[in-house]
């Protein structure tokens, strides 16, 4: 495809070959492919179960959110299984960058259930969904709020306010009662955020 | 499941992840313009896919891959001039944010 490199074009105009480059790189969602891959991990016995968490769970619960990586909470038998997961993808030739494993071009971060009982239960009680026909699981909004209260970055506070609108508050309070620390840190944080909204 | 040994000190675990996230964000901020457009389009596509995801009450195995899923994955749409204009509208706030991040990391 011929182009005239020195011909100026406005921001609204697009040179012909740029369009074709964009067509190649274009954003059709890789998410269903990633979920198929995660389901295969369950089938292979590398992980026992999983649930989508983090920014993608925030998006599932209706809040547009710019995130580049997919947080996946996984049930593993042991710490060794976490290493096995990375070995599996290393052997498959997937790109691995620090904690991220690239699956279908998407940076995936695996968060094991043994981080805390809250993570473990968030997976156990996750909601079953179908994404473009692919079966998957996503953490429930109440668990997602509890997880965001743990991280508690400025962007998490904003999302907590939005997510709380659709949350079952008695259920959220029960989750916090079960998984909060001795000083009730998560409950205090929730009050702080919702009190200021 | 009942014999899980939870992390006693998760500080190191989250510290490693926070470092990795910051390194990745810096790398993304330095991406060429057209790649940022593509990334923004991808996020928008992910959001649409999740927004249309259906809650399930019936049981199914996570290892199961429905036959129609692969068909949906192969759908390709042409990238039009209008798409590009929309992408530009979406990417500008992102670029401004990335530039602000770069500025703040310099100071």
Image (cartoon, rainbow, N blue to C red):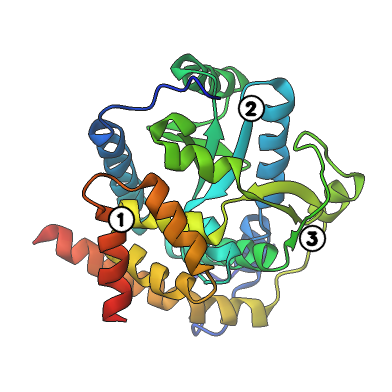
Residue A148 figure quarter: bottom left
Residue A186's label in the rendered image is 1
User: Of B18 and A26, which appears nearest the observer?
Assistant: B18
Residue name at image x 49 percent, y 65 percent:
A170
Residue A51's label in the rendered image is none
- Give the Cα separation between the discs numbered 1 and 3: 45 Å
A179 relative to B56 in the view: left or right: left
B3 relative to A46 in the view: left or right: left
Residue A89 is at least partly visible in this image:
yes
Mark 2 residue element: loop
Residue name at image x 39 percent, y 74 percent:
A161
Q: Chain of mark 3?
A: B
A87 relative to A79 in the view: left or right: right
Identify residue for label 2.
A48
Q: Residues within 10 Å of mark 1 (few under 14, many from 20)?
A: many
- Give the Cα separation between the discs numbered 2 and 1: 28 Å
Residue B9: horizontal and vertical position, in percent? Answer: 25, 29
């Amino acid at each position: 495809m011929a182009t005239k490199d020195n011909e100026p074009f406005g921001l609204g105009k697009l040179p012909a070959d740029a369009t074709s480059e964009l067509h190649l790189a274009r954003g059709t969602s890789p998410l269903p492919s990633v979920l198929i891959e995660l389901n295969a991990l369950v089938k292979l016995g590398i992980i026992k179960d999983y649930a989508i968490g983090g920014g993608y769970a925030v998006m599932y619960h209706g809040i547009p959110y710019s995130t580049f990586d997919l947080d996946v909470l996984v049930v593993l038998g042991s710490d060794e299984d976490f290493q096995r997961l990375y070995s599996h993808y290393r052997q498959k030739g997937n790109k691995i960058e620090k904690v991220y494993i690239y699956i279908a071009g998407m940076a995936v971060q695996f968060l094991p259930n043994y981080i805390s009982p809250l993570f473990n239960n968030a997976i156990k009680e996750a909601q079953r969904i179908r994404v473009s026909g692919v079966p998957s699981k996503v953490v429930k909004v109440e668990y997602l709020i509890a997880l965001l209260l743990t991280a508690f970055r400025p962007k998490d506070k904003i999302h907590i306010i939005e997510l709380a609108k659709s949350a079952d508050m008695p259920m959220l309070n029960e989750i916090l009662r079960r998984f909060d620390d001795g000083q009730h840190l998560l409950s205090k944080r929730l009050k702080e955020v919702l009190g200021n909204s | 499941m009942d014999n899980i040994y939870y992390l006693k000190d998760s500080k190191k675990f989250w510290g490693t992840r926070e470092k990795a996230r910051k390194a990745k964000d810096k790398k993304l901020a330095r991406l060429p313009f057209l790649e940022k457009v593509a990334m923004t389009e991808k996020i928008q596509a992910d959001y649409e896919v999740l927004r249309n995801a259906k809650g399930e009450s019936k049981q199914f195995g996570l290892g199961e891959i429905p036959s129609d899923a692969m068909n949906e994955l192969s759908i390709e749409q042409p990238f039009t001039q209008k798409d590009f204009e929309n992408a530009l509208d979406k990417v500008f706030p992102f670029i401004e944010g990335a530039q602000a991040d770069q500025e703040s990391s310099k100071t």
